[in-house]
Amino acid sequence: MLSDEYEELRKTVEGFSRDVVAPVIGGFYEREEFPYDIVRQMGAMGLFGLPLPEEYGGMGGDYFALCLALEELARVDSSVAITLEAAVSLGAMPLHRFGTAEQKAAWLPKLATGERLGAFGLTEPEGGSDVSGGMRTTARLDGDSWVIDGTKAFITNSGTDITGFVAVAALTGRREDGRPEISTIIVPSGTPGFTVSKKYSKVGWNASDTRELSFSDCRVPAANLLGERGRGYAQFLQTLDEGRIAIAALGVGLAQGCVDECLRYVRERRAFGHPIGHYQAVQFKLADMEARTHVARLAYYHAAEKMLRGETFKKEAAIAKLVASDAAMDNSREATQVFGGYGFMNEFPVGRFYRDAKILEIGEGTSEVQRMLIARELGLADL
């Protein structure tokens, strides 16, 4: 059971999603247009600052509060939800966790209000899940500047009109044992040598911003190093562990949205003299959908609880992400079946849900990677 404070937040975002997002988001989705006005209103509500300190304009809340907001947004639309998730967990949180006092003062106030969005430049075209082994982007010190060369792929929030910076993971040398030294460097938007490609043509998340980035002799001050040199890989692992809980919350929201839409539809749609919800075949589908959603919600609640207590939560985050992405994919498929031909139409939310669900099994660690992490935490990697 949620505390009064959490429940008030949940209801507030639920109302915003229903009254502000739901009536218009289908148009943005079909036009593949970034919803700047919705994002502005989310910023005014304080959603981008939920887990950030009040001294930087944040709400002084915690990561679980962010997850609750993500779940409620994703019940209506995942493009809006992923914009918030990436801006906070991948953009603002690394800066909050690892940034210097000067970096925080320069960026966090604008990130907390949604005036600016941050992005995390990790994935590369040929790297995939092999982040350290597949990384080709380099950064070298030249006097008092970092010089960055390379390419990043599938980077969310990286090319909007309000994108403030991309935190770029890059090879900055080799360790004594030959392993790559990876560091993270803040590259402000508009920096010479930093090129943002046109938006990808995507299967889903069509109202969010996703782009390829390239860096050619891109120079930024040495002071733009985020955290310690050589700690970029460790930073990214911590960032992804937390982000997996957030993605799980988003997946639960999508799964719940499928239940919501189907419950309305099966009462209205009639066949053979009855609402289709009268028939046991449909009832069983809805029962399974509700059960999946409930279990996935408990999984991300548990992972978030361990994180907030300061306990190790890597396994729980992987379980939550795996279970929630499965629930989203299964529920969206079943919801489309319940809606029949209408489920194949983009004007109906379940059509968008079906398109949006698949990426949850890929982004921020594939389902296969989650299973590897769970097995490793069970000690099976040493057998």
Image (cartoon, rainbow, N blue to C red):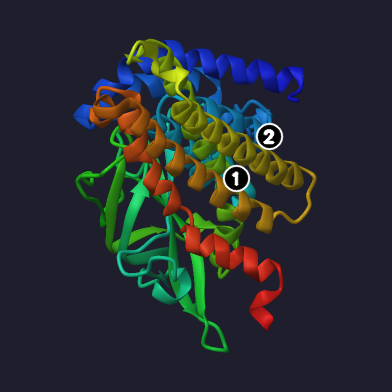
Near mark 1 (Cα within 10 A), the count class, few <14, some 14-19 or many ≥20, is many
Looking at the image, which residue is at 49% across and 58% down? 367
Up the image or down, 39 lies above or below 330; here it is: above
Q: Is residue 8 above or below residue 115?
A: above
The number of callouts visible is 2
Left or right relative to 61: residue 159: left
In-image side of 336 versus 240 (left or right): left
Q: Amino acid at mark 1?
A: Ile
Residue 337 horizontal/vertical position (percent): 34, 33
Observer-nearest of 63 and 178: 63
Q: Which mark is residue 126?
A: none
Question: Can you identify the residue that label 2 sits on?
Answer: 62
| Amino acid type for the residue under numbered disc 2 | Asp
Assign a secondary structure to mark 1. helix
Residue 358 in the image, given as x and y percentages of width and height: 38, 47
Q: Look at 34% across and 32% down and name the residue there.
A: 336
In which image quadrant can residue 7 be found? top right
Q: In the rendered structure, which disc, 2 or 1, sits on the residue that comes first in sequence?
A: 2
The C terminus: image quadrant: bottom right
Examine the rendering and report whether any part of residue 135 can be seen. yes
Residue 349 in percent (x, y) is at 34, 25
**Looking at the image, which residue sits at the far front?**
272
Viewer-side residue, 293 vs 136: 293
Q: Which mark is residue 245?
A: 1
Alpha carbons under labels 2 and 1: distance apart: 13 Å
Which type of secondary structure does the marked residue at label 2 adopt?
loop
Q: Is residue 253 visible?
A: no
Residue 233 in picture, x, y percent from top left: 55, 66
* Numbered disc in front, either 2 or 1: 1
Seen at 40% across and 28% down, the residue is 77
